[in-house]
Structures are given as structure tokens and as C-alpha cells.
Amino acid sequence: MDERKKTIGGLEAKKQESQRSITLILEDFGEVLFSRIQGREELSGNGEEYLRLRKEIADSEGFIRLIEEDTLRLKELEDEIRAKEQQNASLLRDLSEACARIGRQVLNDPEFEILGPYKRQIDAIVPKIEELEEKLSELEERAGTNVFAQVGRHARAMVYRTLLSQKQGSLEKLYESMGEKLIRTDGESLVADHEIAPVVREAAVIKENAAQAGEDLAALKGERRRIGNAFGAEGGPVKRIQGLEKHIAHIRGELKLVYRSFGEAASGADTGKQFASILTPDDTPALEKIALLRGTVADYEIQIEKLKIAIAIDDEKAVVEKLNRGIEEYRERIQSAESAIAELEGRIAGSEQHIKELERRL
């Protein structure tokens, strides 16, 4: 391979490196200049584009912060909802127990006529519970060795226990309903002089706390739903952040082009008074570095061009030499052909002379 082509490759690499350095310096230089002219008349053209791109970046970064805040808030909400659900469940259990305790204590008290319907239901269900308990007791007392009889007893006992559990649950629910009835109907005034008054007041407080906990829980779930719906409509938080970060990277690339264009204009040889108001002595090193690198790039381009011309000249010389060799080959072929023709013409002349001699003999 021609050494000059290797030299061109090395010069091209150095030229590209110098151009990259110029680009980076121009971008930094343009950014510095823009920071000096914000809000001034010079902000036109590239300046307007600069402001638009900066706003897009700021808006996107703001959206990312909001998404991160919402994501963090979602985690907090899950913890708060879990804690509030536990608190609410505990309060409802306490309320249920307090109401059932009230119902049991006022069951046979004639002062509470409003509880009559519940008492009648309880009077109807208690005998059934006692009957089931008695049947279970009888089954457990029976003895026997017959396997089939034992299986039958176990099956009946299971049915009785299930029914008993259901009836006991219904009884407990009736006690609880009685207590709730007293609380709903201004129970504190009805039991003001009754021994159950403290329990009623306690139950009323628990009910208020449970109601407040329920409202708090509903509010927390509503907030979680709002944030979740926003994520669901526009994609998950991770996906949205990735999209915004990709957009920011793209805008930063466009912004660099604006910086470079502005720096290019401000560092030109014919800037005149256009940038006089924003250039300062502090810019001298950057401007000198840019000029030096531009000169270096120009030198590389001249060297590359000269080497390419020299290679092109040598290539054309090689073509000419090849063509000259072709011409010599054709000339040698012509000379050889002329000799062959002369030989053939001589042979023709000899044959013609022989013909004449033979004709005279006729």
C-alpha cells in the first residue's frame, strides 16, 4: 500500500480530532455567551430557540420530579392504607364486641322496649342452641364398637356442630345489633342511669373513631386511585421517566447545536460589532484556541489535498506508461506484419514468373 495513503489516513484522524475539539469549545463558548445575554435584546434567532429548548428541558425535568414524587407517594400510601385498614378492622372488632356486650347486659332489662324485636328473636334462637348442645352431649356420651354406628354419630355430630356454630353466630349478631340500636337511638340518654352507660359511651367513641378511620381510608384509597389512573393512562412511572429522559437527551443534543452555531458566529473573523457587547477579555483564550485549531485543520486539509494530488499524478503517469507500452506492442506487431507481407509478395512474384516461363513452353 502507498505510504502516502497511510499518511492521509493519519492526517484525516488528526483533522477529525481537531474538529471535535473545535466543536466542544464552540459549544462551551456558545453556552457561556447565552448565559450573559438572557433577557437582553440579543436574544433573537438562535436565542429564541435557546429559550424554547431550555424551557422544554426544565418542563421535562419537572415532570420527572412529579412522577418520582407520585411514585414515592404511592409507596407511602400503601403503607398508610395498610396501617389504616388494620386500625379500622381493629376498631370495628372493638365496636362489635362492645355492642354485643351491651346487648347481653340489657337483654332482660324491661326498660329498653325499643329492643323488643331483638329479644323475641333471641328468645326463639336460644332454645334451638340449647337443643343442639343437648343433642351433641348425648352423641358424645354414647358408646359402641360398631364402626358404622360410630361413623354415623360422627357425621351427625359434625352437622350439629355446624348448625350450632351458625346459631351461636346469629345470636352474637343479635346481641351486637341490640347494642348498635342503642347507640343509634341516643343510647347515652337512655342508659344515663344504667350500669351499662360507660360501655355505651365507650362504644359511641369507638364508632366515631371507626367512622373517621373509614373516611381517612377512603381518602387514601382515592388518592392512590388518582395516581394509579394517571400512571395507567400514560404508562408506568418507569416507562414515563425513561421516555422523558430520552426526550431530554434529544433536546440537549439540539441545544448543543444552538450553542455551537452561536459560538461559531461569535468566533468568526467578520463578527464586527455584532457581538462586541457580550464578548469580554475572558473570551480571548477560547477564541485563540479556536483560531489555532481552525488553522491546524486547514493545514491538515492542505497536506491531505497535496498528497491526494501527488497520488493522482502518479496514477495518471502509470496510465500513460501503460498506454505507451501498448503502443510499442502494436508497433512491433505492425513491423512483423509488414515483413510477412513482403515475404508473401516475394513468393507471389516468384509464382508469377514461373507461370510466364511455363506459358512460353506451350
Image (cartoon, helix red, strand yellow):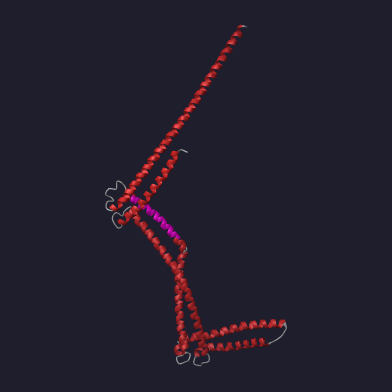
Residue 130 lies in the magenta-colored region: no
Residue 250 lies in the magenta-colored region: yes
- Residues shaded magenta: 242-263
**Is the magenta region chiefly helix, strand or loop?**
helix
Task: Tell me what residue is drawn at x 40 percent, y 46 percent.
Answer: 16
Which quadrant of the figure has residue 243? bottom left
Query: Is the C terminus in the top left, top right, bottom left or bottom right quadrant?
Result: top right
Position of 225 with respect to 121 (left or right) is left
Which quadrant of the figure has residue 174? bottom right
Task: Tell me what residue is drawn at x 32 percent, y 56 percent.
Answer: 35
Q: Residue furthest front?
A: 3
- Along the line of sight, the residue nearer the viewer: 4 or 232: 4
Q: Residue furthest top?
A: 361
User: Compared to 41, does 130 lie above or below?
Assistant: below
User: Compared to 302, does 335 lie above or below?
Assistant: above
Mark yes or no: residue 106 visible: no
